[in-house]
Image: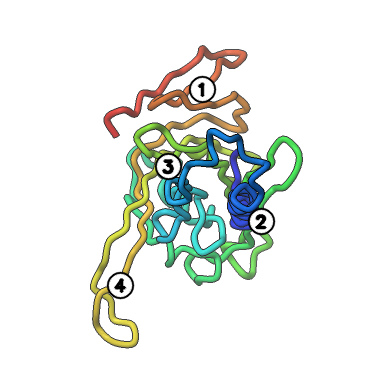
């Protein structure tokens, strides 16, 4: 599953915890050989408690998907051969900020289910709408997040890429209500791979490799990211 929202997360933990309680309270539902296991020996996976945990588990921040408008800032401009920005402050990139203001939505059905989309007008006096979107494909074994990203700048082209990112949690000096340290969750660019205009090839993950399926005029491509 590509998109895992906080609501789904809460429901899953309700089922897990509720099931564990039911097993403990209903002896008949537990095999005799298992009934002697102490409750302290029952281990459940920990609930994500830090912004880093949540970002890694669901690719979201404070219950909201990471802003696609900020995500595409980590891609090179189409007119440039080299990348620009290396990292994004996730809290500062949310859709209610001025710099990254956008209408963000999540596709809930159809073949694009799980895709997060952002749209905005770069100029108030011009009826041109820019859009960007990403589909979170998951994590490699080394923890690298793989995104399938698309961007449109008002023309007919929808340029698609693969973007590889990693989250880091640290602190920075910040003057808000007063000087002091501020916890910072950053999304760091670890690389990208262009796919083309409206590319529809299948992409999947294997270990520390990203596999781009063969197309009508292209062979299968394997991108080894073991060293990243």
Occupied quadrant, residue 214: top right
Q: Mark 1 and mark 2: span between their CA atoms?
A: 26 Å
Query: Secondary structure under badge 1?
Result: strand
Sequence-wise first label, 1 or 3: 3
Is residue 152 left or right of 37 when viewed as pictured? right
Which residue is under mark 2? 105
157 is higher (above) or lower (below) than 25: above
**Residue 182: which disc?**
4
Mark 4 or 2 closer to N-term?
2
- What is the x, y in percent for residue 141? 38, 32
Q: Is residue 46 left or right of residue 81?
A: right
Closer to the chain start, of discs 1 and 4, is 4
Q: Nearer the viewer, residue 223 or 37?
A: 37
How far apart are labels 1 and 3 at the CA level?
24 Å
Q: CA distance from mark 4 to mark 2?
A: 29 Å
Residue 32 vertical placement versus 224 (above, below): below
Q: Secondary structure at mark 2?
A: strand
**Residue at the spot of label 1:** 212
Q: Residue at x 33, y 64 (%)?
A: 184
User: At 56% from the left edge and 60% from the top edge, which residue is drawn?
Assistant: 64
Please give left or right for residue 153 compared with residue 36 in the image. right
User: Which mark, by number, is residue 102?
Assistant: none
| Residue at image coords 38%, 57% | 88
Q: Tag 3's secondary structure?
A: loop
Residue topped by disc 3: 79
User: CA separation, marks 1 and 4?
Assistant: 39 Å
The residue most toward the bottom is: 177
């Amino acid at each position: 599953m590509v998109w895992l929202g906080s609501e789904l997360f809460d429901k899953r933990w309700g089922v897990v915890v509720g099931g564990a309680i039911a097993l403990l309270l209903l002896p008949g539902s537990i095999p005799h050989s298992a009934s002697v296991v102490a409750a302290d020996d029952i281990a459940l996976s920990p609930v994500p408690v830090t912004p880093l945990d949540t970002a890694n588990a669901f690719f979201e921040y404070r219950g909201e998907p990471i802003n696609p408008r900020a995500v595409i800032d980590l891609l090179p401009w189409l007119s440039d051969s080299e990348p620009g920005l290396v990292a994004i402050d996730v809290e500062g990139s949310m859709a209610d900020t001025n710099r990254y203001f956008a209408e963000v939505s999540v596709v809930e059905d159809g073949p694009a289910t799980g895709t997060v989309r952002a749209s905005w007008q770069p100029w108030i006096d011009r009826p041109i709408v820019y859009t960007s979107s990403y589909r979170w494909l998951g994590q490699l074994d080394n923890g690298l997040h793989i995104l399938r990203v698309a961007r449109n700048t008002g023309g007919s082209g929808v340029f698609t890429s693969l973007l590889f990112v990693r989250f880091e949690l640290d602190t920075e000096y910040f003057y808000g209500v007063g000087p002091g340290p501020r916890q910072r969750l950053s999304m760091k660019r670890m690389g990208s791979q262009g796919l083309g205009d409206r590319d529809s090839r299948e992409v999947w993950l294997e270990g520390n490799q990203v596999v781009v399926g063969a197309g009508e005029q292209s062979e299968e491509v394997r991108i080894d990211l073991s060293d990243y």
